[in-house]
Amino acid sequence: MPNPVLVRKVAIDRAAILMVRKIKKRHAVHLWGKPGIGKSDVVHQTGALLGWKVIEYRANLREQVDLRGIPNVEVLADGSKVTRWLVPDELPRVDRDGEFGILFLDEMNTASQQVQAALFQLVLSGKLGDYTLPSGWVIVAAGNAVSHRAAAQRMPTALANRFSHFYIVADVDAWAKWAVTNGIAPEFVAFARFRRELFSDEHGLPVGDEHAFLTFRSFTRASEFANEDVDLREELIASDVGDAAAREIEGFLRLYASLGTLEDIVRDPENAKVPIEPSELYAVATGLARLAKRSNFKQIMKYGNRLDSERQTLLIHDAVMRDAKLKETTEYGAWAVSNPHIN
């Protein structure tokens, strides 16, 4: 496999758009990227978008026999005997799984060389022994680069050449868009936006024996403890993202709490304090967006109009992403007219 670093890097939300175009042409696609970046999630989301079933096949947990099936002796009409292979039931079938779908070979390049060799025929011709992949189904694979030290092996060149390759990089804005609509703690969304460099592809993976380190996967898991008892919270977060990141997150959470309740801002938006520090501005804008609804949007907009353009836009976009009906309010209409270049 050519070094994935040489493959064009794309943000995860753009990778989803590109992948849809590829699989509609029945091209096999391989997604590369650091562990915990959301490669598996984007495949399942793509399937949901298309209305296609996704069958996930963990290649690194399989042996060669799991793919080819087991031999069965069949007696022919003339009495002679032949060996036929019993096809694994989990592979796609039109009668059960539908005419169109995605066969997702996750962790493909952490599989053994023997399993990768068996998969070559499936990717090359849609066949695996006596099994034929339905014509409406397409193969998508995902894996980590060898340089990511995630038990990955180099993919044989002939196999690699059968795929279209995309190297996915972390994108805070794409993750934040998902987080806002999926109930992730606003403090964590604000932290990711404020310290976005911690999630960059260049930030790297642990160089030693650290088992807990910062990825969007571990960060999302840690966000469940945003409102945990303060004397336990940092340690709980550290168990997911590591000590250094946990210290920063805990400091940010304490800062967030020190701003006072967001309800106080809604009650008196014209006199409530407007922060100066960027970290506080991100926290307030993200928190108010989570709180916004038709009954309080007028008050929130009064405060939002006192924020700088960047945080004002962040607040409004997050709010309407959560509740599209806010676009029907007079306050949103006035803002949209004043900011036509942003919409």
Image (tube, rainbow, N blue to C red):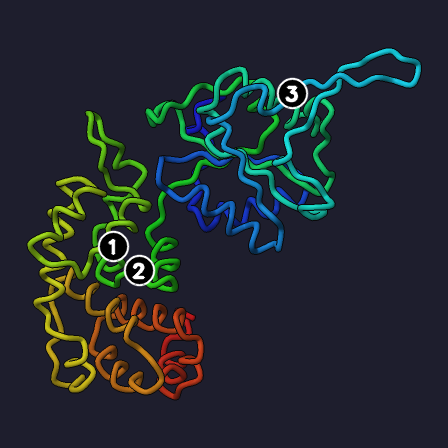
Q: Residue at x 36, y 48 (%)?
A: 171
- At label 3, which amino acid type do we have? Ile
Classify mark 2: residues with Cα within 10 Å, few (<14), some (14-19) or many (20+). some
Residue under numbered circle 3: 70
Classify mark 3: residues with Cα within 10 Å, few (<14), some (14-19) or many (20+). few
Q: Which residue extends farthest right?
A: 78
Classify mark 1: residues with Cα within 10 Å, few (<14), some (14-19) or many (20+). some
- At label 1, which amino acid type do we have? Ser
Rendering coords of residue 177 (x, y %): 38, 60
Q: SS for tag 3?
A: strand
- At label 2, which amino acid type do we have? Ile
Closer-to-camera residue (78/98): 78
Say which label, 1 or 2, has the lower sequence index: 2
Residue under numbered circle 1: 223
Q: Residue at x 74, y 45 (%)?
A: 95
The image quadrant that residue 68 belongs to is top right
Rendering coords of residue 299 (x, y %): 25, 85
